[in-house]
Amino acid sequence: MLLFSSGGITTTVALVVMVAFHLAILTSFPLGVPLEWNVFFIYSGLVLFGVHADVPVTAITSPLLMVLLVVSLVVLPVVGNLRPDKVSFLPSMRYYAGNWATGLWLLRPGMLERIDDTMVTSARTPRRQVERLYGPGVFEGVLGRTQAFRSMHLHGRALNAALPLAVGDLAGAGAGDLAGAGAGAGVSLDDYEIVDGELVAGMVLGWNFGDGHLHNEQLLAAVQRACNFSPGDVRCLMLESQPMGSPSLAWRVVDAASGPVVSGTVRAADLLDAQPWEQDPSRVQVTGGAGGAGGAGDSNVGKTDG
């Protein structure tokens, strides 16, 4: 409306809506949001479309500026919404709407500390940082709050649904087998520390900005080269955001040492009635890999109706 109006009531109404929209975000102090973003949009909206409402789009005479505007405002958002696995959600203008790439890292006890001790990282492990300030036993609560925040979004519930499949192929292996010791009970999620990928990216890279593509296979491979984990030591459950026009989100599990484990999809509609604490693999579809809980060839794993 602002782009194609030239003042008057239409411009005024659009400016009021945009200023109110960004003020609502700014004054709620949301988690992990660059608040200067909202200040900038309020200012730029008033300057570009309020003070200079009489300047039409056709006033742009620079071919280079036109190309830059079309690429950044049209091409990247369209491609990024059709193929969110290829373009970051930021230039795709998907923003923080509960639909962006994310992931969980599953680490056996001591593996996160091995990353800290082996690599040159920007910070200590989240556990070491928290326990240095508040003592032992506090980190689990902080980590749980992070997982609870993630689970309030549909993509967090998708991660929860696929989580049992991340170690499903190890269910018959002994916990000691993976560590080079004797046989033991079957491996389960209880044998792992489950950490949001953003925390790992923040520690290793010093930056994450909420984009799951910063802690995907590329980061996992770099960490593996430095730490040389054994199979089953570290696994990543990665989830791509839902493309425009598709009913499903794609997920995959990768082992740091042995590579791809299992992959599949999950229908967004199947997550609408899921509670944030559920870990129900029947809500996801397995399309590749072993998958453990029934295996990829088991037609009973995941919903196939619709």
Image (spheres, rainbow, N blue to C red):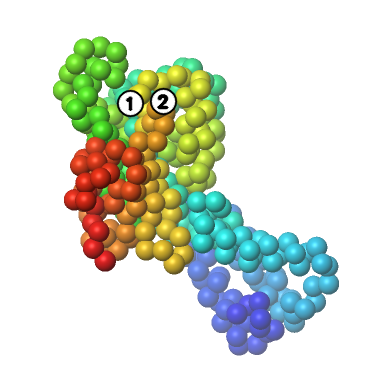
Query: Hey, what amino acid is under mark 2?
Result: Ala
Secondary structure state at the residue bearing disc 2: loop
Q: Amino acid at mark 1?
A: Gly
In the depicted structure, whether residue 154 falls above or below residue 58? above
Q: What x and y, as percent, mark residue 14? A: 57, 79
Q: Is residue 229 above or below residue 286?
A: above
Residue 33 pos. (x, y %): 50, 52
Q: Is residue 24 above or below residue 264?
A: below
Q: Residue at x 41, y 32 (%)?
A: 259
**Mark 2 near mark 1, Cβ–Cβ under 8 Å?**
yes
Q: Is residue 169 left or right of residue 258?
A: left
Count all numbered tags in the image, as a single digit.
2
Q: Secondary structure at mark 1?
A: loop
Q: Measuring 49% from the left and 17% from the top, which residue is drawn there?
A: 118
Q: Examine the rendering and report whether any part of residue 127 can be seen.
A: no
Residue topped by disc 1: 232
- Local packing at callout 1 (Cα closer than 10 Å; few below 14, some 14-19, many 20+) is many
| Residue position marked by numbered label 2 in the rendering | 257
- Measured in 3D between alpha carbons, the distance from the residue under mark 2 to the one under mark 1, in whole angstroms, is 8 Å
**Rendered residue at 21%/12% (across/down):** 182
